[in-house]
Image (tube, coloured by chain):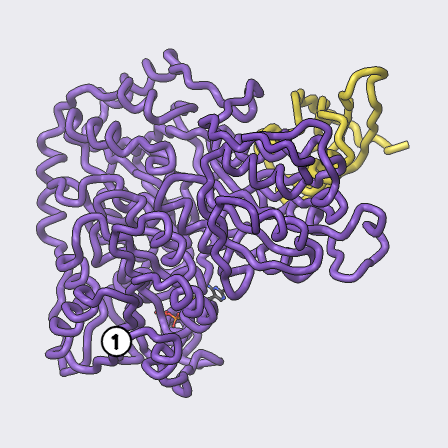
């Protein structure tokens, strides 16, 4: 409804957000964004006050990833804006649609080193897909529409809109209503990439596929981002092709497919890495040959021809020269290549590898084995549970030992590997999916990086479950120091951690610590059946390592499996 | 070391040059020459960027092409090192 009252920039902002279906935003106020917060006071949009702008940015990411909507975060100028930077970088690396709104000092003060003035536009160049600085309140609505279109279309990503304080207060010539007008499409070809099928390339790809005796499907995060999980699963069922997944691709392939070999790369399964090293055709789908995936690039999939499906032309031939590229929407292009194959022998070989290289959970002594705990949680949790992680050993164990039915159910910082992601991302996920269980798997190092967000959990009574894998170490760095730096454990000891149970209790979060194997099942059960938030601290041995591990600059089939 | 000239048409935004140069530097190219002029009565800029790198020019071409304000790019190989006068 357009009210008769003159509209300010602040009002326009929330009206346009509503037009794009935004119901929830994450933020933190301050001087240069006060007019926007004043407009928020009258808006139907629900604001979640986080306790650090980095928390707000990760919650926006978690919200976006769990719901496939755009995540929105707000921050004031200067330090508020710089605190968003890590979240923007994370969203760029993982192609997550986020719109970040920052307040800026008034246009008359800009460029004068004013109080809390920072050139956030300049800072945004390296960590956003695009950014805007608004100079005229009458352009604000259009800029915001563009921001949403750019964040969502093609390869998704974060967009920043910097709004000076005088523009937040200025009155627009033409009021903007707040009626939801579905997704606006822009005519710009850049924003709206080709959806047509590249028929010539499809033909070549089909020929390669027919010739192949040992094809592998290499599934990346792009499948989930393109909402093409159904098409991918259909492709697999028609072709019977064995598949592997990247960290961000987990959940795309049906985990019980008899020829799904799990994650490839540095901490990938033996089966996945062996199969990729032996294959004669690698079909990359929404994946980008990242260094954690390929190991030593020159020796990655050495016998394979490559078909690369992607939405981003710049990913084609970036790290590995391809034989055929198929650009565009996976939803359209994947079905075009789905034809039955005669690869029975290879299928059998891959199935055999899947069966032979199953995870072993026997672990000597009484101390708890984190992979076994995560595997048990995975088997116990209800369908459609969302799991977020932080970064480190616990993250790799979660990726290895938990299974997901959809990529929107596993949220982890892939490209950036940002510690501090897990808890605020879980908050965002819980807000976007209030009826689903949300579990944050974290480490004792990462947890402390955004521990202030326990306040957000408390304030909004979010039933987030936190599983804190506590090795009293920066475990992943410690593992590398032991393996590759002669055991010189420089600055990785956390044995003076706070009392995590007491800490959780301070935020009214129920909590328990377990130290022995026999306590695991009951504790998991108690956590998952508890109605509110819960922190389960799981003490493990400080020297447990993540295996397998492909050492740096090594081919993926030369993995280490123990010290 | 190879030298190429990129002919870029872009939206006449005050920020476009900064974006082009940021991507060029980040992707590992050195700018050895640059000219820029606006078309009269059109909100379009013509920019010629001469760059040098060991890397394939396709990488830079593809990355610059993704910039929202860039409308088009053509690439020309330039053999002689030019003086940016
Ligand atoms: C913000 C940030 N700083 C530093 C790192 C480097 N880093 C990667 S893993 C890791 C250790 C993480 O420790 P913890 O959260 O306890 O997890 P663990 O490996 O012990 O499971 C560090 C410091 C990072 N990824 N992100």
- Residue assigned mark 1: A538
Colour in which chain B is drawn: yellow
Residue drawn where x is 83% and y is 28% of the image: B35
* Place of residue A229 in the rendered image (x, y in percent of width and height, measured from the top left): 27, 34
Q: Is residue B40 left or right of residue A68?
A: right
**Relative to A30, is A5 above or below?**
above
View quadrant of ligand 1: bottom left
Residue drawn where x is 38% and y is 69% of the image: A476
Which quadrant holds the N terminus of chain B? top right
Q: Chain of mark 1?
A: A
Residue drawn where x is 91% and y is 32% of the image: B85
Instruction: Say if residue B60 shows up in the picture.
Output: no
Label 1 environment density (alpha carbons within 10 Å; few <14, some 14–19, many ≥20)? many
Q: Secondary structure at mark 1?
A: strand
* Place of residue A183 in the rendered image (x, y in percent of width and height, measured from the top left): 46, 27
* Place of residue A248 in the rendered image (x, y in percent of width and height, measured from the top left): 35, 46
Residue drawn where x is 53% and y is 50% of the image: A73
Extreme residue in the bottom direction: A496
Q: From the Cβ of disc 1, is ligand 1 less than 8 Å away?
A: no
| Image-quadrant location for residue B61 | top right
* Place of residue A75 in the rendered image (x, y in percent of width and height, measured from the top left): 60, 55
**Relative to A517, is B46 above or below?**
above
Q: Is residue A261 left or right of residue A45?
A: left
């Amino acid at each position: 409804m357009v009210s008769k009252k003159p509209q300010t920039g602040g009002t326009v902002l929330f009206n346009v957000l509503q037009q794009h279906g935004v119901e929830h935003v994450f933020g933190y106020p301050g001087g240069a964004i006060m007019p926007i917060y004043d407009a928020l006071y009258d808006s139907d949009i629900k604001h979640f006050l986080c306790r650090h702008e980095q928390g707000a940015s990760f919650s926006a990411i978690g919200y976006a990833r769990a719901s496939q909507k755009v995540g929105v975060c707000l921050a004031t100028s200067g330090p508020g804006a710089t605190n968003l930077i890590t979240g923007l970088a994370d969203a760029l690396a993982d192609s997550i649609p986020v719109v970040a709104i920052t307040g800026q000092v008034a246009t008359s003060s800009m460029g004068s080193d004013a109080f809390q003035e920072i050139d956030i536009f300049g800072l945004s160049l390296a960590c956003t897909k695009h950014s805007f600085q608004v100079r005229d309140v009458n352009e604000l609505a259009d800029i915001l529409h563009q921001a949403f279109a750019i964040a969502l279309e093609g390869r998704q990503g974060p967009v920043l809109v910097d709004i000076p304080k005088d523009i937040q207060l200025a009155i627009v010539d033409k009021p903007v209503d707040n009626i939801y007008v579905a997704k606006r499409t822009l005519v710009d070809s850049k924003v709206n990439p080709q959806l047509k099928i590249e028929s010539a390339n499809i033909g070549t790809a089909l020929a390669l596929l027919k010739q192949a005796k040992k094809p592998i499907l290499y599934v990346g995060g792009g499948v989930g981002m393109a909402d093409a999980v159904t098409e991918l699963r259909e492709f697999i069922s028609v072709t019977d092709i064995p598949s592997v997944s990247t960290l961000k691709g987990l959940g795309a392939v049906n985990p019980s497919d008899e020829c799904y070999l799990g994650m490839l790369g540095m901490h990938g399964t033996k089966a996945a890495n062996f199969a990729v090293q032996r294959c004669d055709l690698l079909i990359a789908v929404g994946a980008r040959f990242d260094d954690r995936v390929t190991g030593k690039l020159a020796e990655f999939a050495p016998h394979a021809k490559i078909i690369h499906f992607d939405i981003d032309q710049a990913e084609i031939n970036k790290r590995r020269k391809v034989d055929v590229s198929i650009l565009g929407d996976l939803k359209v292009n994947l079905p075009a290549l789905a034809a039955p194959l005669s690869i029975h022998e290879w299928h059998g070989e891959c199935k055999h590898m899947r069966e032979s290289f199953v995870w072993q959970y026997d672990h000597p002594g009484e101390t708890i084995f984190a992979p076994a705990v995560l595997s048990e949680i995975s088997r116990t949790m209800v369908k459609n549970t969302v799991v977020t992680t932080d970064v480190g050993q616990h993250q790799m164990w979660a990726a290895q030992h938990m299974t997901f039915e959809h990529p929107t159910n596993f949220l982890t910082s892939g490209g950036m590997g940002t510690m501090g992601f897990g808890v605020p991302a879980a908050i965002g996920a819980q807000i976007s999916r209030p009826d689903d269980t949300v579990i944050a798997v974290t480490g004792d190092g990462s947890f402390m990086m955004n521990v202030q967000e326990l306040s957000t959990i408390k304030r909004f009574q979010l039933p987030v479950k936190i599983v804190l894998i506590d090795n009293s170490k920066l475990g992943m760095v410690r593992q590398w120091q032991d393996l590759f730096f002669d055991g010189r454990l420089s600055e990785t000891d956390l044995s003076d951690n706070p009392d995590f149970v007491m800490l959780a209790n301070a935020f009214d979060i129920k909590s328990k610590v377990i130290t022995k194997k026999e306590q695991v099942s009951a504790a998991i059960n108690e956590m998952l059946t508890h109605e509110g938030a819960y922190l389960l601290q799981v003490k493990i041995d400080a020297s447990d390592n993540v295996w397998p591990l492909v050492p740096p600059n090594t081919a993926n089939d030369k993995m280490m499996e123990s010290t | 070391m190879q030298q190429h000239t990129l002919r870029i048409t872009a939206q006449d935004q005050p920020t476009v040059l900064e974006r082009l140069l940021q991507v060029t530097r980040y992707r590992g190219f050195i700018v050895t020459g640059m000219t820029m002029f606006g078309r009269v009565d059109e909100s379009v800029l013509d920019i010629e960027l001469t760059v040098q790198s060991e890397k394939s020019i396709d990488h830079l071409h593809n990355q610059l092409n993704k910039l929202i304000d860039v409308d088009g790019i053509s690439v020309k190989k330039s053999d002689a090192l030019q003086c940016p006068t």
